[in-house]
Amino acid sequence: MDRFFFSAGAIAAFVALALGAFGAHSLRTKLTPEMLNIFEIGVRYQMYHALGLIAVAWAATRWPEAKLHGAGWCFIAGIVIFSGSLYILSLTGMREVGVITPIGGLAFLAGWAILVWAINR
């Protein structure tokens, strides 16, 4: 699983970087400043948690007995739900999709809590 989470983190970082460049160069004139800010928050949190996935992969090699899989899956869920909902909201204006954004935030929080718990058991 360490290779899976490392690969997932690298892919998520690549996508975050590409989306950030897309936002900076293509969306600046198409979105309102508020919607561009929302898009950028999605990119930022995706990058943070891409690095979190790489940390999970590293931790799995350092503490192979730790139950770290839950942290990695929470980070993936958070990227999809939190960042994904912000991308949809900013690009479509569908405010109702914002109701699921906190679920992604909770997934991020759970991932960090599981990571701390797993390496300290």
Image (spheres, rainbow, N blue to C red):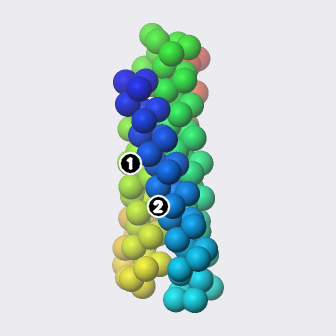
Q: Provide the secondary structure element on which disc 2 rests.
A: helix
> In terms of sequence position, does the residue under pointer 2 or pointer 1 come before the other?
1
Q: CA distance from mark 2 to mark 1?
A: 10 Å
Q: Residue at x 42, y 85 (%)?
A: 93
Q: Residue at x 51, y 61 (%)?
A: 18
Of the 4 image quadrants, the one containing the N terminus is top left
The amino acid type of the residue labelled 1 equals Ala
Q: Quadrant of residue 117?
A: top right
Which residue position holds label 1? 77
Q: Position of residue 120 (x, y in %)?
A: 58, 17
As drawn, 20 above or below 23 = above
Q: Quadrant of residue 88?
A: bottom left
Which residue position holds label 2? 83
Q: Provide the secondary structure element on which disc 1 rests.
A: helix
Task: Name the foreground residue: 55 vs 119.
Answer: 55
Q: Position of residue 115 (x, y in %)?
A: 53, 29
As drawn, 96 above or below 102 = below
Label 2 with label 1: CB-CB less than 8 Å:
no
